[in-house]
Image (cartoon, rainbow, N blue to C red):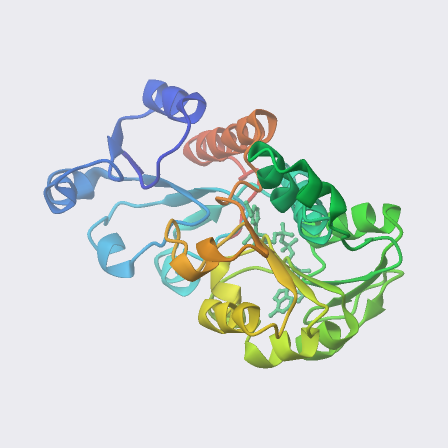
Amino acid sequence: MLLLLAPLPDFLTGPLRERYTVHDYFHAEDKVKLISEVGASIRAIVMAGGTVLQPAMLDQLPALEIVSVNGVGYDGAPLDYLRGRGIRLTNTPDVLTDDVADIAVALVLMTSRRLTQANRLLHADRWNEGASTLTTKVGGKRAGIVGLGRIGKGIAQRLEAFGMTIGYTGRNAQPVPYAFHTSVTELAAWSDFLIVACPGGPGTKHLINADVLRALGANGTLINIARGSIVDEAALITALRDGVIKCAGLDVFENEPHVPAELRAMEHVTLLPHIGSATRETRGEMARLVLENLAAHFAGQQLVTPVI
Ligand code: NAP
């Protein structure tokens, strides 16, 4: 009665299989056949933050009651559709905040201090080239955060400790000791590092476009740990190629797991395979929340971390 829509760790799928009848849609060779055989009995879906749920598929699951996202971002879930059918939605907020903020800081340091390039040079036994390259100090620089939520605040706290000045933008100003900028373009023009930490989905698609990158400028660095859809990847590639911005650090991409060849070929881009929350500790906590939400739902109790 439960459908798995993503490759998930054994410490989550193990307990799920002990408690429920689990059908693995992600690994099924014939997905159409699987849905035609078991669709009517499915009461729950477990998916990852990057999974996109299609209403046409959900139409074939008439008994569906709950969708549990193993991640905080739920931009792949059709909220209006789920609301219309009274289907509950849960995610895993807070427990991953520290790890994702850490990865944002890592990308700031990797890009500013050219750590990936230095590491590559030493692996190639080219000490002198690595040691003689001067890089950029982060202390005293400006970090502009797009989306000052749980993760954005974690990034701000960490970068303040590095001596950086913090600014932010969002739909609303907040009671925080950081300067609010009314638009992402204005924030980009102010920033040395523009750090994307807002949700994905239609409301933020290509929020970071060619104009924003032009405003960030030739000494500016773009960091994205949020969602690939927020950055116009084609515009980013052009901006990096033409020196419109200085460099970029990316944990997320528009069409994962595809990373454009142009980005892979660029020496001044640091690329990570969407590993923001990928520690044993945090993935364990995320799995716990998925299991607790499902258990609460089927026991008729309040959900632990409901979205809707
Ligand atoms: P959150 O607490 O909900 O924070 C999101 C922030 O974005 C809020 O402060 C919100 O402020 C702002 N925001 C919303 N719409 C915006 C817009 N159109 N323009 C600018 N800001 C906007 O979420 P979170 O827990 O920090 O997570 C943020 C995102 O990180 C998730 O949605 C997910 O996609 C991503 N993430 C990535 C990884 C990874 O592995 N790389 C892991 C976890 C999460 P306002 O309401 O004032 O606009």
Residue 141, quarter of the rendered image: bottom right
The residue positioned 60% from the left and 81% from the top of the image is 211
Asked where in the image residue 128 lies, by quadrant, the reply is top right
Q: Is residue 192 left or right of residue 110?
A: right
- Looking at the image, residue 85 sits to the left or right of residue 24; the answer is right
Q: Which residue does the image show at 75% across and 46% down from the upper left?
A: 132
Say which of 66 and 15 sits in front. Answer: 15
Q: In this rendering, would 205 be left or right of 21?
A: right
- Quarter of the rendered image showing ligand 1: bottom right
Total labels drawn = 0
Q: Nearer the viewer, residue 189 or 15?
A: 189
Whole-percent x, y for residue 174 in the image: 80, 65
Of residue 196 and residue 261, the one placed in the foreground of this image is 261
Q: Does residue 126 appear in the picture of this structure? A: yes
Indicate whether 157 appears above or below 209. Answer: above
Work out whether 14 lies above or below 128. Answer: above
Q: Residue furthest bottom?
A: 211
Q: Position of residue 66 (x, y in %)?
A: 39, 44
In front of the other: 137 or 35 = 137
Q: Position of residue 289 (x, y in %)?
A: 54, 33
Residue pictured at 62% horizontal, 38% vertical: 126
Question: Residue 218's spot in the image, x, y percent?
Answer: 69, 72
Res. 260 visible in picture: no
Q: Quadrant of residue 305?
A: top right
Relative side of 180 to 96, left or right: right
Residue visible at 72% across and 59% down in the picture: 148
Q: Quadrant of the N terminus?
A: top left
